[in-house]
Structures are given as structure tokens and as C-alpha cells.
Image: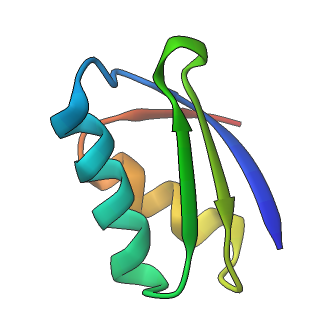
Amino acid sequence: MQYTLQVQGMTCGHCERAVTQAVQQIDPAATVRIDRAQNRVDIESTQPREALAAAIAEEGYTVAA
């Protein structure tokens, strides 16, 4: 499945790595593309959107519905 999440709070490369690692802890095979300027995270994963969003939120970022 392909998901696009709006994620607030990403300000640097470390943030991008944290978000990517959070997603890949849920699905190690996930593909993650981040557009920090647009606060957008595109994810290709077999896991449910809710699980991916929760993993990102646990890292301290705000995920818009």
C-alpha cells in the first residue's frame, strides 16, 4: 500500500532518519520518501497506516489525519 502522511516537526536530517527508522521498525521492507519542505512522508508498506502513524508519533512528531 502507498500512504502519504503529513508530519509536523521534522526540521533536519536527524528528524528524517528518526521518522524513517520508526517506520522501518514496524516494516523493515518499507520504502520511505520524505519531503521536509512540504512536511510530507510517502510510505510504501504492507502495514496499516495507523501503525505507521503511531510509530512516527511515538518519536515525538505530529501526524495529521
Residue drawn at x 34%, y 21% is 9
Comparing 62 with 15, the one in front is 15
Comparing 13 with 27, the one in front is 13
| Quadrant holding the N terminus | bottom right
Image vertical order of residue 48 relative to residue 53, above or below: below
Q: Position of residue 12 (x, y in %)?
A: 23, 23
Image vertical order of residue 13 relative to residue 8, above or below: below
Residue drawn at x 32%, y 40% is 16
Image vertical order of residue 32 relative to residue 12, above or below: below
Left or right position of 65 against 64: right
Residue drawn at x 39%, y 52% is 56
Q: Position of residue 7 (x, y in %)?
A: 51, 31
Q: Position of residue 22 (x, y in %)?
A: 32, 64
Left or right position of 29 against 28: right
> Can you tell which quarter of the image residue 11 is in?
top left
> Can you tell which quarter of the image residue 58 is in?
bottom left
> Can you tell which quarter of the image residue 43 is in?
bottom right
Residue drawn at x 43%, y 87% is 28
Comparing 37 with 3, the one in front is 37
Image vertical order of residue 39 relative to residue 58, above or below: above
Q: Position of residue 23 (x, y in %)?
A: 43, 67
Which residue is situated farthest in the left direction here? 14
Q: Colour mode?
A: rainbow
